[in-house]
Amino acid sequence: MNRALAGWTLGAVIALAGAPLAAETPDREKIAATIAAQHDATVKALQDWVALPTIAAEKRGTPEGAEYMRKLALDAGFQQAKIIPTDGVPAVFATLDAGAKTTVGIYFMYDVKQFDPAEWSTAPLEATLVDRPGEGTAIVGRGVVNQKGPEMAFLAAIKAIRASGQRLPVNLVLVAEGEEEVASTHFDQVVAVPEVQAALAKAIGVFIPSANQNRDGSAGITLGAKGAVEFQLVVGGETSDKYPKTDIHSSNYARIESPAWRLVKALDTLVADDGHTPAIDGWFENVQPLTARQRELIAESIKPGAEPGEKALLGVGRWIGDEDYRTSLERFYSQPTVNIQGLVSGYTGEGGKTVLPARAEAKLEFRLVPNMTRAEAVSKLQAHLAKRGFDDVRVTISGGYGPNETAEHSALIRAQKKLFESQGIPYTIRPRNAGSWPGVVFNGPPLNLPASQFGLGRGGGAHAPNEWFLITSTDPKVYGLDQATMAYVDYLYALAEEAAK
């Protein structure tokens, strides 16, 4: 760590300790000093974690990733941590009994998305410290914001409380999976383990650490997330004898069916003629429309001048149907989708190649909203294709889960509001994330727990090249690593206070 960074960390002790309290956090100044003292070690621990990727889609880093996660939990102070086998990538279950009246569940994902080093400006697994002009110093590496940076800050918060001689205000139950990036294929098996389910049943709710702060210092609260189902449609010699087993000369298309055209025809039935509205039979049957309160929250979240910046970030010039910004946001949060992630068939190199492809594959995902379920979506897709005679189109579900939703008055959300208001952090509330995480596993039966996201600090580039997480901030309104760590300390105390009401 360079001298400039170390100097910022020393000065941050004063800022951290002097911030208004989110709740009655005892010895807050001492905890802040401990966080600053462990800063370099926390950064190094994050860099080491990034260096060991677990990528479920590539079967990379397993079972090493689970064992590493287990050791991180024990190092942070969890009294027990064990690996939970699944039919896929193993998970980790850990508990920390602080003798408190309140128990809180914590969800981690220890897996990361695939990456192509050629697309990055620095090595994706080296977690390089770089300067971000106008913002401060950040780490660039795969997984630093989604979600290893926020998760490491949370673990550092636990360490700081304990190292300061304090007892945690809540007991913790941690569940960490290694398949979130492939739609949590086997996570339901983890929560179904009797020991895990019994521990989680004692919790007032479950949250995932996140970096939910914006460039201007404002923060976001979300009351849920869309569900996600990932699947593939395949047509070819492996699905029917009317298609060739290997690529053949294109002249044969005059007498032999094309898998590529067959797949295109099947895909075309999944959306309406507008190219985006789902057209699967019965798709909107159980879709819960936005409530008046949810529409109000969306309207309140719109900041003056935000639309051009968002369009520039996404690289687009207009929304669907030239809709206004508010309408586009309502669609963003409320519309279930049928998206093609990728479409592959035949020759894709330079020039042409006169072949009739033997195989065509499309990778797709559904985004689901309340009150849709994964089982319903899959069943309706299969029935839709069968009704139209696409028995030669093979459907393979690779993972997924339904949406989740948590009440605005739950202790998880009340504690976030209290923390933000006490520290003077402007915030908006969104009815749900348009992205997904498997909160429904906690939110739905048999646990029926509130599930949310919480975290300050800032980052970007999730699933993209040059993913980054802010370590030191030049703007006092935006939290760096140490301040984000202190926010987790305050949040745990705020949760204990709210749960006691």
Image (cartoon, rainbow, N blue to C red):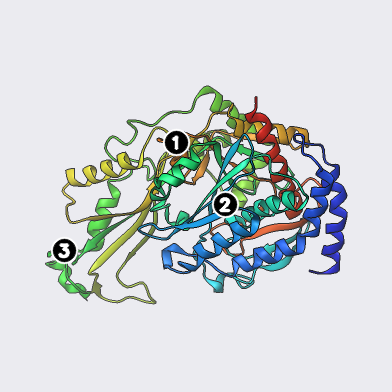
Q: Position of residue 22 (x, y in %)?
A: 75, 36
Q: Which badge, 1 or 2, comes first in the chain's sequence?
A: 2
Question: Camera-side residue: 271 or 332?
Answer: 332
Distance from disc 1 to disc 2, alpha carbons, whole Å, reads: 37 Å
Q: Position of residue 70 (x, y in %)?
A: 54, 60
Q: Which badge, 2 or 3, comes first in the chain's sequence?
A: 3
Residue at the limit of the structure toward the front, as seen here = 99
Residue at the limit of the structure toward the top, as seen here = 292
Mark 2: amino acid: Leu
Within-10-Å neighbours for mark 1: few <14, some 14–19, many 20+: some
Q: Residue at x 64, y 38 (%)?
A: 100
Q: Residue at x 74, y 32 (%)?
A: 421
Q: Is residue 374 left or right of residue 156?
A: left
Within-10-Å neighbours for mark 3: few <14, some 14–19, many 20+: some
Question: Camera-side residue: 32 or 184?
Answer: 32
Q: Quadrant of the N terminus?
A: bottom right
Q: In the rendered image of this protein, does residue 138 appear above or below residue 229?
A: below
Mark 1: amino acid: Leu
Mark 3: amino acid: Glu
Question: Camera-side residue: 451 or 256?
Answer: 451
Q: Which residue is mark 2?
A: 314
Q: Which residue is mark 3?
A: 257
Does the image show residue 359?
yes
Badge number at residue 447: 1
Q: Are marks 3 and 1 in contact (CB under 8 Å)?
A: no
